[in-house]
Amino acid sequence: MVTLQNAENALKSVYLGVVANQLNVSANPLLTKIRRTDKDVWGKEIIKLAPFGINGGIGAGEENSLLPEAFGNSYARFKAELKNLYGKIEITDKAIRASANNIGAFVNLLSDEMEGLVKASSFNLGRMLYGDGSGLLAKATAASGKVVTCDKVNNFIEGMVVDFYSTEGSPSVTQARITYVDRANKQITVDKDVTVSDSLNIYVQGSKGLEITGLGAIFSESETLYGLKRADYKWLKPYTSTSETEISDNLIQTAIDFLEENADSKINFISCSSDVRRAYQAYLTAYRTNIDVMELEGGFKAISYNGIPVVTDRFVDSGTMYLLNTNDFVLHELCDWKWIEGENGSILRQVANHPAYTATLVKYAELICDKPNGQAKISGIKSTVTNPFQCNCVKE
């Protein structure tokens, strides 16, 4: 007979390992390239020494001259708080009792809940990798009842629960659930009325300013990064190119050459928006170049630039390409994904005053890039490409 204890045992011994592996390996192609470690975690913070430049104890001299002075490596002290990442499932008491005498129905019940949790968590993790830590999803520019017009919608999906904040930082509408995303018109429909007088910032429920430090923070104009002032550490500024131009091998290679020559960085991963990938594929086709396809860890596929995977990601803004050395990125974590347990080790808890039980998955982690100046971002890429072999002759 299926009981609440059976459900807990299954969540602990059967589903936890599978879910953790899926979130660590299959959630996002960029995440699979990032090393995970529990080092440099001190209490609730990450404190680590990041080397920059080279050892200074080198030189040349005469046969009997003094040896070079010893000047060791240069280090910067990074400091960041561990972020709290949560995923929650809910099972009603009625559903558990209905499947009490049917083990197959019970397994299906748990499997459906865990599949939904993995899908939602994967979406959220992938989005945060490209975010700036603020949790900002988009800006609402207009609203008509429950229909909200935004500056972009690539960070939204049906079922997501969001908060609307004024530009001054005060909450306007909280816990509004998205029922439809109109990607063609950049609109979302929520289950609450929204009023936009000027503009509103949209965040995942309760997540404002609490997300991991993604690529958006590295390439932002913020004065500080990992507790250091960019003005004091110039190498915290990465390579950026914003000139509007068509995609080409030369555009990509220029960024790669700059990073190799100035930051000793070897690019091994390229991520771009779907319109940029289509433009690059059109460019390769126009020049009669074969399009090589690569198989990545986690089952992801990518086209190739000189052996470097070029991956499209929905969370990369339109007209944008990132060129990364993923060896410089580390996901520091207090532990892998775990269930939050009560005093008696229980993970399923009754929802107060409701006939339902919830279980919460948690991970305490933060993303650190040891060498920000070894990364590049190209924006303003046009989504069209000129075909040099196309005939533009005018018939007489």
Image (spheres, rainbow, N blue to C red):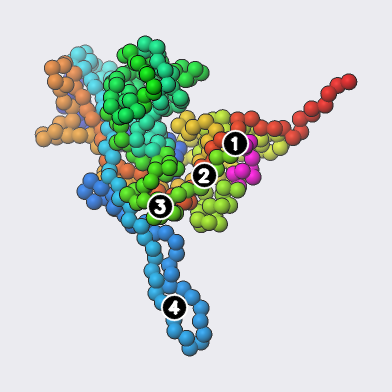
Q: Secondary structure at mark 3?
A: loop
- Crowding around mark 4 (Cα neighbors within 10 Å: few <14, some 14 to 19, many 20+) is few
Name of the residue lying farthest toward the top: 145
**Sooner in the amino-acid sequence: mark 4 or mark 2:** 4
Q: Is residue 302 above or below residue 261?
A: above
Name of the residue lying farthest toward the bottom: 64
Q: Nearer the viewer, residue 116 or 165?
A: 165
Quarter of the picture containing the N terminus is top left
Q: Amino acid at mark 3?
A: Ala
Q: Is residue 371 above or below residue 210?
A: below
Name of the residue lying farthest toward the left: 344
Q: Nearer the viewer, residue 52 or 333?
A: 52
Assess whether residue 252 is covered by the magenta stretch. yes
Q: Which mark is residue 68?
A: 4
Q: Amino acid at mark 1?
A: Glu
Highlighted magenta segment, given as a residue range: 245-253
